[in-house]
Image (cartoon, rainbow, N blue to C red):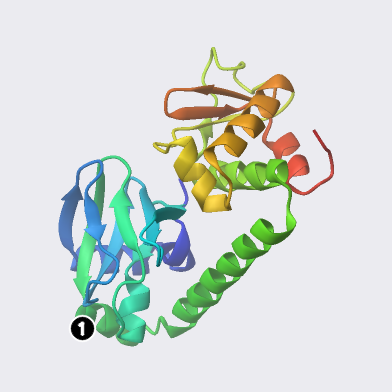
Amino acid sequence: MARQGFGGLLTDEQWRRMVRSGTPRRHAAGQVIMRQGDPGGSVHLLVEGRVKVTLIRPDGEEVMLIMRTVGEALGEMSVISGRPRTATVTSVGPSQTRMLTEERFRDFIRSMELEPPLLRHLVERQNESDLLRAEQVTLPAGRRLAAALLRLSRLSGEPIEPGLGGPQGEGGRGVLLRLGLSQRELGESIGLSRTSVAVEFTRLREIGLIRTGRQYVAVLDVERLRQLAEGDVVL
């Protein structure tokens, strides 16, 4: 799988050098890697596994924002801004990171002249945030869920397994999403209730676009899902 996030903007050699300089950290499923409100002071490079990013709202409710996978830099915003962590990062399954202190991370950025990719990374993060907010305001529930599943397909989709729709799905390329998320968490990330997510999942199953099981969703035709997310087709 290609590196995501900041790591995806670096050369293989730049990424290897940063990873080698970090202290190995292993995280069990459900383990908090960094917590909202804590001081910064370090960056974790995600080298294996997936994590979810959650936020505690002013009313005390925890909501999921997004998932991250290999290549991501975690906690870099606090290091850059000097402010406390703005979200909680939790390992979805077993994962590994390499931890760099704030000083070590800044030294690498300067010595390897990585300011341009870091700036691009920050701009892409802002664009991502703007896009997610716009989707919640403008898109109906079905397109919101389709867009979320499409992002997850690009992030961590595995080629579909035999028995879940054939080697290439039904009518197109298929992928398996091992979410490790509840419908409630998925709904929180796109501003939908658990009930709304369940209704939209039922619709997607009825038209043969997905199959679902415990902790997984099989997308049987990624191209058709993209068309649905972009409004080219309707349920």
| Residue 34 figure quarter | bottom left
Q: Is residue 157 left or right of residue 40?
A: right
Q: How many numbered marks have been drawn onto this rendered protein structure?
A: 1
Between 198 and 25, the one lying in front of the other is 198
* Rendered residue at 53%/29% (across/down): 217
167 vs 59: above or below: above
Label 1: which secondary element: helix
> Is residue 105 at least partly visible in the picture?
yes
In the rendered image, residue 185, in percent from the top left (x then y), is placed at 45, 44
In the rendered image, residue 15, in percent from the top left (x then y), is placed at 35, 65
In the rendered image, residue 199, in percent from the top left (x then y), is placed at 64, 31
Between 103 and 145, the one lying in front of the other is 145
Please give the residue where the numbered disc 1 appears in the rendered image: 103
In which quadrant of the rendered image does the C terminus lie? top right
Q: In this view, does 190 lie to the left or right of 23?
A: right
Residue furthest out toward the top: 163
* Rendered residue at 32%/57% (across/down): 89
- The amino acid on which the numbered mark 1 sits, given as a three-letter code, is Glu
Badge 1: residue crowd in 10 Å (few <14, some 14–19, many ≥20):
few
In which quadrant of the rendered image does the N terminus lie? top left
* Rendered residue at 60%/70% (across/down): 127
Q: Is residue 212 left or right of residue 138?
A: left
> Is residue 71 at least partly visible in the picture?
no
